[in-house]
Image (tube, grey):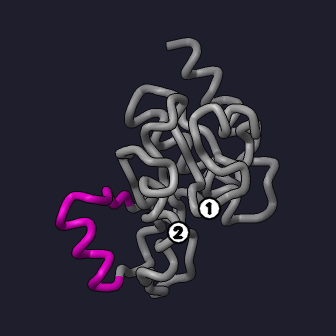
Amino acid sequence: MFHLSKHIYSLERKMLHNTHLPTAFEYYSAIHLTRQHKKPFFVYQDISPSKKAEFGFPIQDKGVDIVDEYFQHIAQVKYYRKYSKIHYGKLATFLATPLLVGKKLDMTLIRTDDCLLHSEIKQIIARGDLKDITLSANDFLKDTKK
């Protein structure tokens, strides 16, 4: 468990030092997934190109914001304004990742609790192809001010 604590501490430091709120929300979300699944999740931009290539993932970001240590679970993070709606087009590249890398992946959308989902995205979630996690925007903002 020490390993996870150290990993979470590292993510927290990166989150708190990031002034760009959507990127800080990616670190916040990686912390949430690490705690929830009890295994390390990483912000995609922090992973070395060689590690991405080793698992058959693109070097440049193609919609994946967070990935677990074995590249089996990926997440897209959306930090949108209140009442903004997430449409299929905003997730299309992310949703195509299993086809791109040629393997089945666990996929999660992480979003603030005050943004909305278009009916197409709701259908994808209802089918079980995508998990939906909402995190409190207020809690996130409080944590970034600590």
Magenta residue check for 104: no
- Is label 2 in a helix, a strand or a loop? helix
Residue 69 falls in image quadrant: top right
Q: Which mark is residue 52?
A: none
Label 1 close to label 2 by CB (< 8 Å): yes
Foreground residue among 143 and 49: 49
Q: Rounded to the nearest whole Å, what is the CA distance between mark 1 and mark 2?
A: 6 Å
In the picture shown, does residue 24 fall above or below 125? above
Q: Position of residue 74 (x, y in %)?
A: 47, 48
**Residue, far top:** 2
First to last magenta residue range: 118-133
Q: Position of 136 compared to 144: left or right?
A: left
Residue 133 falls in image quadrant: bottom left
Crowd band around label 1 with a 10 angstrom C-alpha radius: few (<14), some (14–19), many (20+): some
Give the residue at x 35% y 45%: 104
Q: Which mark is residue 93?
A: 2
Instruction: Quickly name the residue at label 1.
Output: 62
Exactly how many numbered labels are in the figure? 2
- Is label 1 in a helix, a strand or a loop? loop
Crowd band around label 2 with a 10 angstrom C-alpha radius: few (<14), some (14–19), many (20+): some
In the picture shown, does residue 35 fall above or below 75? above
- Say which amino acid is labelled 1: Lys
- Say which amino acid is labelled 2: Thr
Q: Position of 30 compared to 10: left or right?
A: left
